[in-house]
Amino acid sequence: MFKLVTILCALAVIGTAGVAFAQQPAGGATPPVSPIKRTILQRADVPGTNLELIYASLEVSAGFRAGRHNHPGVVMAQIVDGSFWLQVDGQPEQVFQAGESFTLPDRIVHNEGSTDKPVKLNVVYVLEKGKPLASPAP
């Protein structure tokens, strides 16, 4: 019995070490930190449609530029803290401050990001189910 317990304990230690080792990046490098922290607060299907409603809180690092992209649906956002810039293709850049909000129509190509300080936003996405939140613009 003692021998069986010893073997099981040894296997558990080896298994745990293997999992921990497997999760380390190659070469001991630190994994990259995303400039966007997106926390999904709620999700719900829109009845009778192929749409999904996603309510999220976003924290964006200072100086982040998303690059031109679009969303498969409508996006509404409110700036909670900081400043956020938005540039819809063919329109001048706009800067939104805490308390202000904006709406992006379905699939509108745009670029966006934070100014020289981090920004926090609350965002509502109404998107096609199964599609990614965003796709690079062609």
Image (cartoon, grey):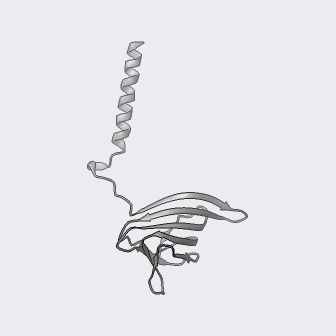
Q: Which residue lies furthest to the left in this view?
A: 27
| Res. 36 visible in picture | yes
Question: Relative to residue 68, is residue 12 depicted above or below?
Answer: above
Image quarter where the N terminus lies is: top left
Where residue 20 sits: x, y (%)? 36, 40
* Residue at the top extreme, as displayed: 1
Q: In this view, does 37 lie to the left or right of 78?
A: left
Q: Which residue lies furthest to the right in this view?
A: 48
- Between 116 and 37, the one lying in front of the other is 116
Q: In this view, does 72 lie above or below 32?
A: below
The residue located at (53%, 71%) in the rendering is 77
Location of residue 33 (image quadrant) = bottom left
Relative to 8, residue 98 above or below: below
Horizontal relation, residue 12 to residue 74: left or right = left
- The x and y percentages for residue 15 are 38, 32
Q: Give the tally of numbered discs.
A: 0
- Quarter of the image holding residue 124? bottom right
Quadrant of residue 92 in the image?
Answer: bottom left
Residue drawn at x 35%, y 31% is 14
Residue 43 x, y percent position in the rendering: 60, 58
Q: Which of 92 and 78 is in front in this view?
A: 78
As rendered, which of 120 and 69 lies closer to the eye?
A: 120
Query: Percent from the top left, x then y, of residue 31?
Result: 33, 54
Is residue 138 something that shows in the picture? no
**Residue located at (36% from left, 25% from top):** 10
Q: Give 114 or 82, whichever is nearer the viewer.
A: 82
